[in-house]
Image (cartoon, grey):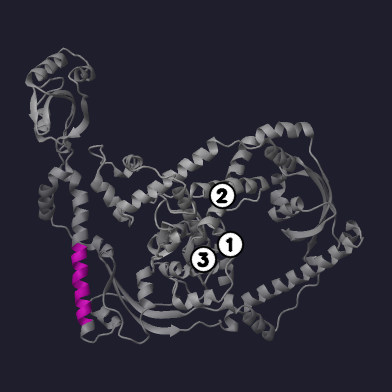
Amino acid sequence: MRRAAALHYTALARDRPARLKVPCFMTGSLRSTARNPVAVALMGVLVLVFLILGVSGGGGRFPDAFRGINANDVVTAGQHTLSSEDFKRMFDRQKENLDQRAGEPVPVDLLVENGYDQQMLTGVAQEQSVLEVLRRSGIVPSDALVDGEIRKLPFAFNRITGQFDEKQFMSVLAQQGLTPRQAQAQLRDELARRHYLFALQAGFTTPRLYAAMSAVQVMENRDVSYFVLDQHAVPAPAQPTDAQLIAFMNQHKDQLTIPETRTFTLVQFSAKALEPTMAVDPAAVQKEFDFKKESLSTPETRSFVQIPVKTAAQGADAAARLQRGEDPTAVARAMGAEPVTYDDKPRSALPDTKVAAAAFALTPGQVSAPVQGDLGLAVLKLLKVTPGKAATLEQARPQIEAELRTHAAQDKVYEITDAFQKARDSGASVADAARKVGATATVVGPVTADGRDVNGKPIPGLDPKILKAAFAESAGGSGTEVESTSPGEYYALRVDKVAPPALPPLDQKRAELTQIYMRQQLVDSLKAKAEALMAAIRKGTSIDAAAAQVGAHVTHQVGLERRTAQQFAQVLGREFLLSIFGAKPGDVFAAGAPTGIFIARLDAVRPGDMTMMAQGVNQIRSRVSDDYLNDVDGSIQAAAQAIIKPNTNLNLARRAIGVSAEEMDKLNAKPAAKGGAKPANKGGPAA
């Protein structure tokens, strides 16, 4: 059911969304909020420092309050902004991670309903605020530093030459939708953030008291008495009537309503599917091999050292010294230069054609006479030759045949789709036109806009472009023309039926609803019984007497410590353990149990062994330091947001990720998700 799916995906998405990775160079933050009073006090000092350094000004520029807000930006924090396109890329990447964890596509509408987009937007607003505070504080890496970091990026190096390749660098950026200017700006921000964090870590020592407080908390031990209230303690729920089930359905209609579904006739044309049927002419294979032979072969490579010289006499001297076996580095430095070494380079990879010709004319160990290259005079010494390997037809045949089959299949598909479209233009239906060209038309649906059937299960094999087209067409129309989903893959469809959102028929869901209804009645009865028992214990009834009323047995757990509590997690559950360590002596409380409800009373809290605590302080201080720094960084983020007051545009962000206007109206009518940006915000400060 949709409700169960929503809970499943919400659990997956509960963590704060991570930030975009390379080649978007922003790092993730450490933690969003600090609760430690020492950290809060420290933040007061940091905020004052920011103000003294001029974060409220603009460094001689116009104040940021007078800067215009770009209509395409979802976040504006001073001079730091994030466009709707960048937000979509970040959201899509996070959704891919969630899809992998869930094992199936996570519907965007469920993520939005549960505030995942708001969390992302708020996180980005905080991140941009921190970066803006750093900029105003003067923490701005120089152009030389940024360029130096760019030249270290692995994807910017040419594999053949081993040198920075600007064209390759820009190509990779283009694939990610980034311009060089954007990449430089993001890397500049990354460096500023990194330097700030390194400085914070290097110049900060966690107070010993902070570690001591943690040790006291970790090593204290607690006594708790508890029993389990299970389903046998309350009467079994009765079978519901139809009227009760209908009322239950209406009560939960938001979760039970089946969204709009569509049924459509679809015909697909696939070059990939045709490839195995394509015959390959041996003559065509030979011709293709002859054309590609050089590129398929492994070229000869050479390793040599090049000594730059200024004059012919200097060159003769260098050549003589190399022939005597002197070290090339020493020879080059004697000439006032540095040696240039080329390792296993093919001739085509050498930048100087004349030097390349000379190098490829030498034998191993041979030294050339001075060579007048395109870039100056030099002497060469050949160190190694790695022979090339000529490609053979038999080795290349599988690859060439596969390529020829692909091209032939694509040509064949083009012919089929052309004949199909001509039949459609002549008045044939999608199904009739498919029969004329030997294709198969299938009926798809009912299917929702996110590719699920009426039971909420994904329908395999449906391309998102096909779904989008199906929900853009009107029912009973002529249908789409032939469209492409990817190279060589085409489709056409006609929408046959549109079913508006509606509750499912009772008979279709009776068994499932009956089970859920009875389970809910049982849970409600258990909760009521638990409240009554806890009230009695609070008024003086012993916990043993309360347990006896329901035939339960009391367990007395003595000396439970935080540091060893994990061993009880599987039996007691995380919720119960958290309740135990969050209670005060004498507190009576309830928590979920594997077979019912825990009813418990915290009997005592005792400090741990002082000697062990003293030793524990030193053991945990390093870890506590990391936690403390995380808290400080979280406080800095909150302070930066309060100082900068970033503007966010949630509606624009939602449009970017594909939320419809109708759905946004529904979302804006609801209260904001906890911790998220304001749904109706159209340019105001972030929540």
Name the side, left or right, on which 446 lies relative to 272.
Answer: right
The spot of residue 425 in percent (x, y) is 21, 83
The N terminus lies in which quarter of the figure?
Answer: bottom right
Residue 289 - label: none
- The residue depicted at 53 percent of the width and 61 percent of the height is 119
Q: Position of residue 578 (x, y in %)?
A: 72, 53
Residue position marked by numbered label 2 in the rendering: 47
Residue 623 spot, x, y in % from top left: 61, 38
Above or below 623: residue 186:
below
Residue 127 seen anywhere in this rendered image of the structure = yes
Residue found 80% across the figure and 72% down from its top: 235
For mark 1, give the secondary structure: loop
Above or below, comparing residue 555 to residue 84 in the picture: above
Alpha carbon separation for disc pair 3 and 2:
35 Å
Q: Residue at x 10, y 20 (%)?
A: 315
| Closest to the observer, 627 or 440 | 627
Front label number (1 vs 2): 2
Q: Amino acid at mark 1?
A: Gly
User: Where residue 557 sits: x, y (%)?
Assistant: 81, 47
Magenta stretch bounds: 408-423
**Disc 2 secondary structure class:** helix
* Residue type, numbered disc 2: Val
According to the picture, the residue beneath numbered tag 1 turns out to be 675
Quadrant holding the C terminus = bottom right
Q: Which label number is shown at residue 111?
A: 3
Q: Is residue 411 magenta?
A: yes
